[in-house]
Amino acid sequence: MNGEIHLHDSVALLEDTPAKHFETGVPLLLRRGQAGTVVMTYGGNAFEVEFSGRDGRAYALLPIPADRLMVLREVPEPVAV
């Protein structure tokens, strides 16, 4: 079970992933590094991720296994010295 990824986390793909446009059904290729937001969790093993443009409109929504995602961090973690 993945303890690092949570609902509403910003995540990025670790590999290219085929998808279809959310509204039109046109085939898309989401590239490694493509950023999205977790909108649903499936027991910590997979996550529904929404991919959106700069305008905030979703263009893809699909389940992604946990091992194909990484969490994007906004602040560094402190370390003990």
Image (tube, rainbow, N blue to C red):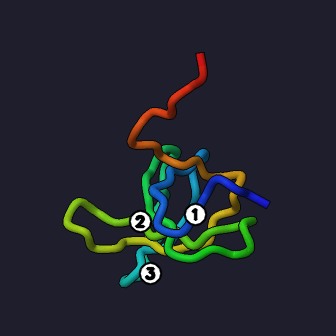
| Mark 1 vs mark 2: in front | 1
Badge 2 density bin: few <14, some 14–19, many ≥20, Cα 10 Å: many
| Mark 1 vs mark 3: in front | 1
Label 3: which secondary element: loop
Furthest residue toward front: 81
Q: Position of residue 8 (x, y in %)?
A: 46, 67
Looking at the figure, which quarter contains the C terminus? Answer: top right
Q: Position of residue 44 (x, y in %)?
A: 72, 66
The residue under label 1 is 6
The residue under label 3 is 25
Q: Amino acid at mark 1?
A: His
Viewer-closest of 27 and 30: 30
Label 1: which secondary element: loop
Badge 1 density bin: few <14, some 14–19, many ≥20, Cα 10 Å: some
Residue 2 lies in what quarter of the image?
bottom right
The residue under label 2 is 51
